[in-house]
Image (cartoon, grey):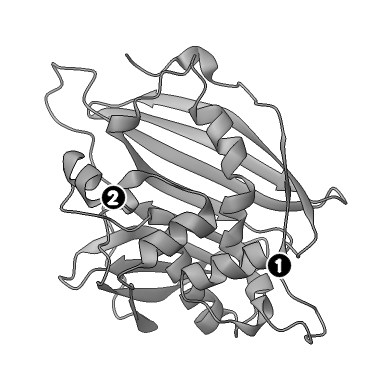
Amino acid sequence: MPLNIACVGRQYPPVTINVTLDALQKYARAYNDDNSAFFDASRAAGIVAPPMFGVTVTWDALMKAMMDPDLHVDLLRLVHGEQDMEFPNPIHPGDVITATAKIISIDVKTTGETMTVELTAANQQGQPVQRTHFIIFIRGARNRDAAAPDPRPVEPDRGAPLFSVAQTIDKDQTFRYAEASGDPNPIHVDENIAKMAGLPGIIVHGLCTMAFTSKVAIDRLCAGDPTRLKRLRVRFSRPVLPGQTITTKVWADNESERGGRKVFAYETFNPDGQAVIKGGIAEVAS
């Protein structure tokens, strides 16, 4: 059954989350980030949450949309295609976050369907802390007479990167990330179910891989200050396996500036040189 396009524009009831110090620090540890901004209470600015911690405060809101029985989401054919996140203001321990989800598009492709869910979150003072476009792809062509699949974006030749950073995924990474993020999808923690889904075994959460790249951006582009990272956008192109070493390459986008922010492009590769993240964008406040 195809996705129900009548659901486009539907907004779901808000969800409220209380942010605890333990939760935000557990999330940082789940992707091996020891940045003092997440742990050192003596900092003048106090402790802040990792920018990617925003996925946890919007998760329940997202699930309200994804589990809508009117929508007809086929979870067995669902893959996470893209994620575009903005971080207008930092999240702090003790914050009370209200998040909402809205379905903003459903598109039929020759290879399946895409759906974009917009997630917004604000703190107890009404300040926005998160804006996300969560984009899924439902595999399986609806148009059986299609002559060819939809074309994939062509990645530009950017030349030599500004720098490359290698990071190793721990063997237990998916278990720690599943607990810290609230994402219990069994393909990340159960070998048998992962293989039943046609995968070689347990795979790393796409958002966990994205969190690893957020550390690269903060460490190398933001001088270690997580509040300077204002946007991350990625297209997930291949799964990552526990134990693999991923390498992120970053380029300056000299012709692009957005709202006074510096814009950088990046891609992340597995040990075979195959891209696991394409079309990455990081926007950094000066």
Q: Residue at x 35, y 68 (%)?
A: 172
**Residue nearest the observer in this picture, 175 or 119:** 175
Q: Nearer the viewer, residue 232 or 252?
A: 232
| Circle 2: element type | loop
Q: Residue furthest right?
A: 125
Marking on residue 21: 1
Upstream in sequence: badge 2 or badge 1: 1
Quarter of the figure that contains the C terminus: bottom right
- The numbered mark at residue 108 is none
Q: Residue flagged by tag 1: what amino acid is it?
A: Leu
Q: Is residue 102 above or below residue 82?
A: above
Q: In front of the other: label 2 or label 1?
A: 2
The amino acid marked with disc number 2 is: Asp
Q: Nearer the viewer, residue 75 or 224?
A: 75
Quadrant into which the N terminus falls:
top left
- Height in image: 182 above or below 247? above
Q: From this viewpoint, is residue 264 visible?
A: no
For label 2, the residue is 190
| Location of residue 148 (image quadrant) | top left
For the residues labelled 2 and 1, the Cα–Cα distance comes to: 29 Å
**Left or right of residue 121: residue 180:** left
Q: Residue at x 34, y 16 (%)?
A: 2
